[in-house]
Image (cartoon, rainbow, N blue to C red):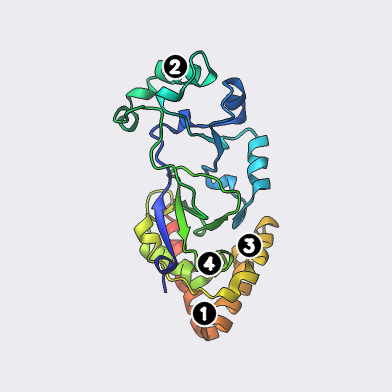
């Protein structure tokens, strides 16, 4: 099966002006925007593992990164002389309302299609691709894809099932590489990645999460996950698992050598 058999992958939120709509806490406090500031994760470096928790989001917030996305109200619902009105006027003074995406909206500061997803997939990856459980219920911009896991699927097992050499190899095959060695996957490509899903893989998620938080190498992680997911779960032989690993390493090395 593929990722698309278990989930729908969509582009993240297109704000039209990330510098205006994604903000640190200092902007939220300055303009009194607490009622409109929602949790957000916008960069891969802000996610240290395979589970993005509320504590992770709070850490980003305290580190003064852009951890909020502004979901502003329609013009008719804005109070005069409020912080929201002041912030919108600031945006107009910077020409944000004249951008391509913003200028075609009825109210330029109202982002369309604001949706949460229960998982995230990094659009542009470095050493290996990353699928993340969104436990913090955080929104994301188009630097990440929204992954909507089907209700019938065990979400923890879905995430854990991705971390194996076979899925990594197919990520390299269906994705594309640009200058700098970056692996980019669009939603339709992400959905084509083979995923050896099994509900029993749920128990692996905390193992993978802990190892990543402890800065263990991905190779150390794969020793454990390949045996559990591919050998025990799908009956692959050691030789077949070694082949999948060598394919992934060969393709990723070729890509990374382009830096």
Note whether 254 is above or below 229 in the view shown: above
Secondary element type, mark 1: helix
**Labels 2 and 3: the sequence-earlier one:** 2
Task: Provide residue 201's location: percent of width, then percent of height.
Answer: 59, 73
> According to the image, label 3 marks what residue?
217
Report how far apart the C-alphas of labels 1 and 2 lie in the structure: 58 Å
> According to the image, label 1 marks what residue?
241
> According to the image, label 2 marks what residue?
89
Characterize the local packing of mark 4: few (<14), some (14-19) or many (20 or more) Cα atoms within 10 angstroms: many
Secondary element type, mark 3: loop
**Labels 4 and 3: the sequence-earlier one:** 4
Task: Provide residue 40's location: percent of width, then percent of height.
Answer: 54, 41
> According to the image, label 4 marks what residue?
158
- The residue located at (45%, 56%) in the rendering is 257
Characterize the local packing of mark 3: few (<14), some (14-19) or many (20 or more) Cα atoms within 10 angstroms: few
Report how far apart the C-alphas of labels 3 and 1 lie in the structure: 18 Å
Report how far apart the C-alphas of labels 4 and 3 lie in the structure: 21 Å
Secondary element type, mark 2: helix
């Amino acid at each position: 099966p593929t990722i698309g058999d278990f989930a729908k992958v969509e582009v993240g939120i297109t704000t039209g002006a990330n510098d205006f709509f994604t903000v640190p806490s200092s902007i939220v406090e300055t303009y009194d925007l607490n009622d409109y500031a929602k949790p957000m994760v916008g960069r891969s470096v802000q996610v240290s593992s395979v589970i993005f928790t509320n504590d992770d989001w709070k850490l980003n917030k305290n580190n003064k990164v852009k951890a909020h996305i502004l979901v502003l109200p329609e013009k008719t619902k804005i109070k005069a002389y409020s912080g929201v009105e002041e912030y919108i006027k600031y945006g107009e003074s910077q020409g944000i309302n004249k951008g391509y995406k913003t200028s075609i909206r009825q109210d330029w500061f109202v982002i369309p299609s604001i949706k949460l997803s229960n998982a995230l997939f990094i659009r542009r990856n470095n050493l290996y691709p990353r699928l993340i459980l969104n436990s913090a219920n955080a929104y994301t911009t188009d630097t990440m894809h929204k992954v909507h896991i089907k209700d019938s699927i065990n979400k923890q097992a879905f995430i854990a099932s991705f971390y194996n050499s076979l899925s990594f190899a197919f990520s390299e095959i269906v994705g594309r590489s640009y200058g700098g060695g970056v692996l980019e996957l669009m939603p339709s490509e992400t959905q084509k990645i083979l995923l050896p899903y099994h509900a029993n893989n749920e128990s692996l998620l905390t193992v993978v999460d802990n190892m990543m938080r402890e800065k263990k190498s991905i190779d150390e992680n794969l020793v454990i996950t390949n045996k559990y997911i591919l050998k025990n779960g799908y009956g692959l032989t050691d030789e077949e698992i070694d082949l999948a690993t060598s394919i992934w390493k060969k393709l990723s090395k070729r890509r990374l050598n382009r830096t």
